[in-house]
Image: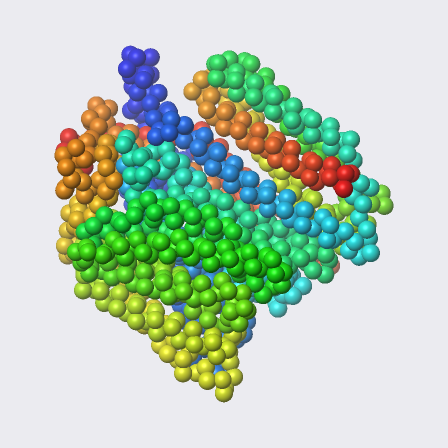
Amino acid sequence: MSDASAHALEHHEPVTSTGIPNKKVLMWAFLGSDCMFFGTLISTHLIYRKISATVGGNFLDIRDVFDIELTSFSTFILLASSLFMALGVSAIHKGNLKSMRWMLLGTIIFGAIFLACQVYEFTHFIHAPGNELTLSTYRGEPHVFGSTFYVLTGTHGTHVAIGVFWLIGWLAYSFTGKMSVAHAIDIEICGLYWHFVDIVWIIIFPVIYLMEYAL
Amino acid sequence: MATESIKYLAPDTENKAKTQVFPRPGQHTTGLIDWLTTIDHKKIGLMYGMTALFFLIVGGLEALLIRSQLWDHNMDVLTNRQYNQMFTMHGTTMVFLVIMPLSAAFFNFIMPLQIGARDVAFPRMNALSLWCFVGGGLILNLSWFFTGGSPAIGWFGYAPLTDTRFAEVVGDMGPDFWIFSLQILGVASLLASFNFITTIINMRAPGMTMMRLPVFTWMTLIVSFLIILAFPAITIALVELMFDRTYGTNFYDFLEGGKPHLWQHLFWIFGHPEVYILILPAMGIVSEVIPVFSRKPLFGYGLVIFSGAIIGFMGFAVWSHHMFTTGMGVVATSAFAMLTMLIAIPTGVKIFNWIGTMWGGRIRFDTPMLFALGFITMFMIGGFTGIMHSSVPIDAQHQDSYFVVAHFHYVLIGGALFGLFCGFYFWLPKMTGRMLSEKLGKFVFTLMFLGFNLTFFPMHYLGMIGQPRRTHTYNEGHGFETWNQIATVGAFILGLGIVIGIYQFVSAFFNKKLKPAGSNPWDARTLEWALSSPVKEYNFARTPIIKARDQAWENNYGPRENHAEKEPLDDHGVHMPDRSWWPLVTALGLFGLALGMLFHRTIDPSGELVRDYTAPILAGSIAILGMIMWALEGPGGYHLFPKENDE
């Protein structure tokens, strides 16, 4: 019996040359690639930040638009979600399905709060009275800041949204009765992704938001 | 517990099928459904290769139209706009739909065999990559049939040529088709690369250490890393361009604060590593072929690999040499000039290693070897002119002249395409189990070599006397006619050679009169030659235990302790994953999403812009549904029971 189950396990997790599961190597490779995606976006934003400060006679002091208290709050929420994610991974490794569900739910809710803040933020920036920042204009005049800002933070938001739906998928799957410790690796790569998206925000928040107040 | 395990090991596919939307094709599927749902890396590789050869003919016809237009001064074969469309489509097709997928074909087919694996790490993802490639190729060529026709912006799509305000035709959709097709092709390349990286790192047979990997596998690994690190730059550049064209952002719009210069940087941060993405696979193939036909091990194996890695690494630090004339300033220009000169060193190291391999060897001039030698010599000419361009003052003179056209065709045809044809002549016996006609092969090589040099060598001179590239005609009195006519004649000879070559490749699969190949017709060195030709569905009946580099050679000629061993036959057989519809469904969803986004804007009778997202949302949902079903169906599988003595 033990022999047969050992074979079954082998099929689930084939022995690899490095001992690291295939899915994990795949996720690390993807994250390496994703660094370059965000690197390109952040560079674009930084390149344009200064050189296009006064297009159309409008000097842009983005502090008139930003709501730094709100963004600081949502930053805190997103970082806190990483704690839930880590605890969720740890729970499934120990086979504690019930605890994993609560932790995934926590991650999902915090991720959703972050997204809600971003939606609120975008709507308010676009309609900020006297300081409307749209994709292509600032105060009704052509400007690049909106282009780089919305596309960069929007791409990050898309990443968070994908993560939220991915976790909802696993949460739903955990109620089918088919989930076991064998799926720990799947939750773990979710976690890798989630932490990475958080780390990207740790770069975006100072570079895009805080720097406007310091320099 | 025991019964459960057995149930898993021999799943009852008939019962499972009933619970699914599409029945999952079973073990004995054949015909069209087999090809549409296959997840076998060999079949996927073949489809990659055949589609790419088809596009080679398409891109070649475009090139011949360009050459016909340039036959004489002020010709009218093409209008100026058609000419621009031709060179745009020719460049985009040859880079993204021919050379890259031909390399991917060999990565897919050969790499798992070289490392002793039964498939790639994620077989269904591999199928998705294939179907995305096919979808991307279709979208690019669908552009012919819609407003404005094909893009006329060059394969580089420089801003502000892509700006909607400067479109020659109102509502020109060409650049949009170009953007979406490149995005989908990017998905294909990225998926394939993630897969190959995981496969090479994780699925090597026991004893197949990294420093025993065949050079071709090493180049696959390096190229895959280049792809995953370089493609994001163009993906984001294209996203920004898409926003510019679709939602009016100002990334590259110089009238509203954007900088067209940024596009050039982002494009070439991708574009220069892309050059090495195109050439390193061919270098890998040649590094396999030359030792076989010299009957010597590769000279300086470690150095060849290390130079490949250095080339890949430095490839990210030389992109601005495409932009010397844009006025980047002295410091940046000098730095990029020096780095460009430096990157010639590892390339030169490789060439000396190939020569060192041949030195004192017993050389056989079979067709693959002829193509390999053609590669080395032609690539060297392209390399020399490349070093000339690294010097800024010389580059300023050559910029936008036919000299540059000559340079990169020597690298990409004389280099990459000769290398890939070399791969076909070398590995088709393994793929088909039949030997190709040497006579016809040598004839093809002669035609291609002659035609290629006739076409492109005169372009050096044309460039020097001042013929500009990307210009649809020239006036009388410059003395351009004679050399252009020689080039055009050469192009038709080259085209004929390629067509006969493609005919020979395809017919090898059907022509039963060809000589059977046997497992190792070339007396070759690497692991794939230890298998029967054509290779069985499961690749390795028993996983080999690798004892040395060049394992097939060691098995035949090495000392006893270097002979490969084999793991014992498993009594539960070889586990094969099931075929699946979902990669195809997901790719169709992505294809529909791109088309939906292309056509989501209409102008209503009052002249207002109306956006209708129904089609993209629907198609996107199909893609997401495909992924969900894919995740839920699992790898599945059945078992095959090879005999004790099967390879």
Q: How is the image coloured?
A: rainbow
Residue at 35% over, 29% down = A16
Measured as percent of width and height from the top left, residue B560 is found at 14, 34
- Image coords of residue B642 (percent x, y): 19, 32
Q: Residue, x 78% and y 38% (percent of image)? A: A213
**B114 left or right, relative to B163:** left
The image quarter containing residue B348 is: bottom left
Q: Which x, y percent locates residue B205?
A: 28, 33
Give above or below for B458 relative to B367.
below
**Is B177 situated left or right of B451 in this image?**
right
- From the top left corner, tell me how far across and down residue B183 is, in percent: 52, 50
Q: Is residue B567 rendered to the left or right of residue A84? A: left
Question: Up-down: is B258 above or below A35?
Answer: below
- Residue at screen point 66% across, 40% down: A153
- Relative to B322, B44 lies left or right: left
- Residue located farthest toward the right when viewing the structure as drawn: A130
Q: Quadrant of the N terminus of chain B?
A: top left
Q: Residue at x 29, y 55 (%)?
A: B354
In which quadrant of the rendered view does residue B261 lie? bottom right
In this orientation, which residue lies closer to the viewer: B324 or A205? B324
**Of the pair B207 and B476, the residue shown nearer to us:** B207
Q: Tell me if residue B547 can be seen.
A: yes
